[in-house]
Image (cartoon, helix red, strand yellow):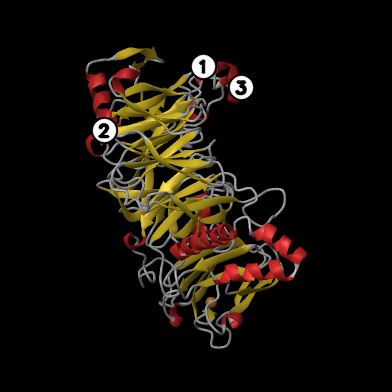
Amino acid sequence: MEKKKGWIFPLVSGLLVGILIASIFFVSPNQVTNNITSSTTAANTAAEKTYVPPGQLDEYYIFASGGHSGNLYVYGVPSMRRIRTIPVFTPESATGYGFDKDSKEMLGGYTWGDLHHPAISETDGEYDGKWLFANDNANNRAAVIDLKTFQTKDILGPIPNIMGPHCAAFVTPNTEYFFMPSRFAAPVDGQYADVKEFKEKYKGVLAAISFDEKTEKLSTAWEVMLPPWSYDISDAGKKSSDGWAVLSTYNTEEAYTTIEVGASQNDRDYIVVLNWRGIEKEVANGNFEEIGGAKVFDPVKNPGYVFLVPVSKSPHGVDVTPDGKYYVGSGKLAPTVTVYSFEKTFEAIKNKKFTGEVRGLPVIDYDTVKEAEVEVGLGPLHTQFGADGVALTTLFLDSAIAKWKIGEWKVTDKVQVQYAPGHSVAAEGDTVSPDGNYIVALNKIAKDSYLSVGPSHPESMQLIDLRGEKMEVLYSAPVDPEPHYAQMIKADKIKTIEVFEKDVNRPNSVWKKEDARIERNGDEVHVYGYAVRSRFVFNGKSETEPDVIRVKQGDKVTVHVTNIDLDEDITHGFGIPLYNLNMEIQPGETKTMEFVADRSGVFPYYCTNFCSALHQEMQGFLLVEPK
Ligand SMILES: [Cu+2]
């Protein structure tokens, strides 16, 4: 009421001004005010929902693929703050990953990786928060990260026979395996065959990777020979479908050139339905052929384990519902997703409801196993799940996420995202009990969402609140190219350690001054020392220069450094400029660096991770005496 009086005054006091103001505000002064107020309120509410005040912590971790960086990015939800980078498939100078002896050997000389799909280890179909697995789509490798330390523990590969394991890693409900099928058909065992021999000599292969928690090592358990198609996102059965896996596949046309046209000719491609528990038994009984050092099972010679189900063409994914009853196929060029019943699939297999064979594999009659076709919108790629039977499908072409209900098969809500989401990740989304609070759209394009950084723009992850009646975008975080897939887990499931254990028997570790030493054996020099706030000790016997390392040009030098500061977050680093060497040593850790001292001169080494007020003084000299 006060405002209205205010606007009446100019109308009588000054005609021109009055008309101007009236023409702007008289239209709908309240509406304008309300719009401003409501959008401000919405922004305020969204901001409040993502605000994590100092002293409080996020509710969830997100582990997001770093694509061609080869890394994993760790975010907190709901703040969407990026809190850590975990180097996995590529060297990282910040932490010296790939510079110290162990991680360098683990990387095997590769400096490029393509990390696509992280997967958290599961126990009884729930994320157990212990391990994280990831694939390298570029170099056929698999990795495991220890979630006690957020460090990469082992890298397996290149894995024989597979090529571009894009689909991996999706773990089985008790982490028996994760599967890595080929995206690119190729001859097995690194053999050569001209692409004209594609149909005869090129193969698709699936590798079943297992992980031994005791040795903390990955290994190739067995493999399955498949047709020369491109295998894409896949999932493991759970509960009543445990023991089975489903893989989406495209290019069943078997095109080997101008694929974008050649692979889109047929109306249908296939979902491969695979009885992994049955194959596991067959392989254990010796029913395999050894190729490239792997045990390879042939499902054509041994029928009854691998089947095909038609799906709309060029699918990017197939996802198993949390109850394990259905699998959802997304043909990215169709406006629907198809929901298939596992029970009906098992029944069809039992009663041989096949319409024929392709490449020696039985094709299950689509109509006998289809449960529903859900009209979700354009470009369905990937379905994640919320609580109480809620399904959430990303729509690449519509730039949206569609919400629908299992059993009702109807879309009840849609939310726009910016833009072109590939995957999405829901809280506890791949488990038997997703909690339904949040979903994050992993957008392939985020044009104009942020300050310009030149012709190439960042991509984005958008946090969406699932708790209300309508889905609501709360936050848009820029990300490095390119987001593929992620895992969102309740924060209290991750149990990190504070420091590495003080293990006096650990090889090459040094915990006290008298054990610090520099040993020479011919032209090999072994340095055993430690870092402690705020000095390095390498020569414990020397009172005057315990931190000087003297070697001769051409020596093979190995430096072992133990961080004996057993306090949380007192991390040290050891960097040698001009030798291109750096490594991080976390509290209680021992790290080893190897190099040939081929360059003579004076090299001041220093601590490369801020550790104390005297961090700047934490330095010493490496002296390389000329020949
Ligand atoms: Cu330091």
Task: Report how far apart the C-alphas of labels 2 and 3 lie in the structure.
Answer: 36 Å
For discs 2 and 3, the disc positioned in front in the rendered view: 3
Q: Give the mark nearest the N terminus, 1 or 2.
A: 1
Left of 148 or right of it: where is 35? right
Residue under label 1:
199
Q: In the depicted view, which residue is nearer to us: 201 or 379?
A: 379
363 sits left or right of 558 in the view = left
Q: Amino acid at mark 1?
A: Lys
Q: Nearer the viewer, residue 534 or 70?
A: 70
Q: Could you say which disc has been placed on residue 279 in the image?
A: none
Residue 456 at x, y percent in the picture: 68, 48
Amino acid type at mark 2: Arg
Residue 363 visible within the image: yes
**Disc 3 from disc 1: Cα separation:** 12 Å
Q: Quadrant of residue 273?
A: top left
Up the image or down, 344 lies above or below 627; here it is: above
| Label 2, residues with CA under 10 Å away: few <14, some 14-19, many ≥20 | some
Residue density around tag 1, few if under 14, some if 14–19, many if 20 or more, within 10 Å: some
Dot 3 amino acid type:
Thr
Residue 136 visible to the viewer: no
Please give the name of the residue rendered at 50% of the width and 16% of the height, measured from the top-left corner.
Answer: 200
Q: Which residue is mark 3?
A: 257
Residue 277 disc label: 2
* CB contact under 8 Å: marks 3 and 1: no
- Cβ of mark 3 under 8 Å from ligand 1: the answer is no
Q: Which comes sooner in the sequence, label 3 or label 1? A: 1
SS type, badge 1: helix
